[in-house]
Image (spheres, rainbow, N blue to C red):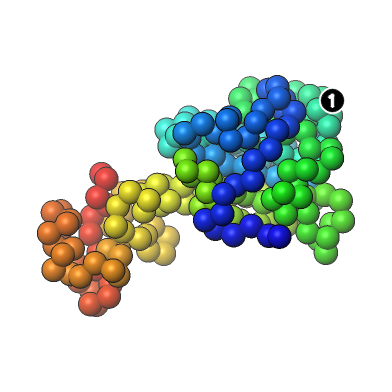
Amino acid sequence: MSLRLGDVAPDFTADTTQGKINFHEWLGDSWGMLFSHPADFTPVCTTELGKTALLKGEFEKRGVKTIAVSVDDLESHNKWVPDIEEVNGVTMNFPIIADEERKVAELYDMIHPNASAKATVRSVFIIGPDKTIKLMLTYPASTGRNFTELLRVIDSLQLTANHSVATPADWKDGDDAIVVPSISTEDAIKKFPKGVKEVKPYLRYTPQPNK
Ligand code: BEZ
């Protein structure tokens, strides 16, 4: 059965380039980003894994642990890691799951048979500290992910989890947020002391509450 937003992220135990992990234990109280790759020694994946390693500080700032998965074995991952490091000028600093039996790929529905019978597509799952799935994105193998967007969406998820706001189109950290429709403008004025701007009765902006 396919996963939906709000579902508990399936737990699993797997071998990784940083040793055996139990996924939920490994996550602890952190946010998590689990993302799949079609295969080792592929060009787009080499850039994506390097980019994730380069952005470690940005993920850490947001309390997000990153973990990659591909359906190759540990020996193959360990041979590929030096290439990722050389090409991207970075030391690998997060685990890659060896999923040669496709246990994780199947749990997370990462194989889309009409795209490829064997390889995983580029799935991304953002998981909250409560272990539920907050975001799912699916890209084809031929399109590398936009990591600025992944960080942006994590900022929105973390803001909206803690404040009664939503984020508008193209919002980025620091921009005004939208007051959720369930709050009246009268209550919003009390709740958001930085101010509320009513554009329509149902579209009210407030400066980002956690800044
Ligand atoms: C890649 O991961 O680099 C890739 C995989 C399939 C098609 C094109 C690129």
The amino acid beneath tag 1 is Glu
Q: Nearer the viewer, residue 52 or 4?
A: 4
Q: Nearer the viewer, residue 124 or 4?
A: 4
> Neighbour class for label 1 at 10 Å: few (<14), some, many (≥20)?
few
Q: Position of residue 166 (x, y in %)?
A: 35, 60
Q: Nearer the viewer, residue 160 or 121?
A: 160
Q: Residue at 69% of width from left, 38% of height from top?
A: 12
Could one spot residue 7 in this view of the protein? yes
Q: Position of residue 210 (x, y in %)?
A: 27, 45
Could one spot residue 80 in this view of the protein? no
Tell which residue pokes out farthest to the right in this image: 117
Answer with left or right where residue 116 lies relative to residue 190. Answer: right
Q: Position of residue 113 (x, y in %)?
A: 83, 60
The answer to whether residue 169 is above or below residue 134 is: below
Give the quarter of the image for residue 203.
Answer: bottom left
> The residue tagged with tag 1: helix, strand or loop?
helix
In the rendered image, the quadrant that contains the C terminus is: top left
In the rendered image, the quadrant that contains the N terminus is: bottom right
Give the quarter of the image for residue 82.
Answer: top right
The answer to whether residue 161 is above or below residue 87 is: below
Return the residue at label 1. Answer: 75
Q: Residue at 30% of width from left, 52% of height from top?
A: 163
Answer with left or right where residue 109 lies relative to residue 181. Answer: right
- Classify mark 1 as within 8 Å of ligand 1 or not, answering yes or no: no
Q: Residue at 75% of width from left, 28% of height from top?
A: 15
Q: Position of residue 54 (x, y in %)?
A: 57, 31
Answer with left or right where residue 32 lies relative to residue 78. Answer: left
Q: Residue at 76% of width from left, 50% of height from top?
A: 106
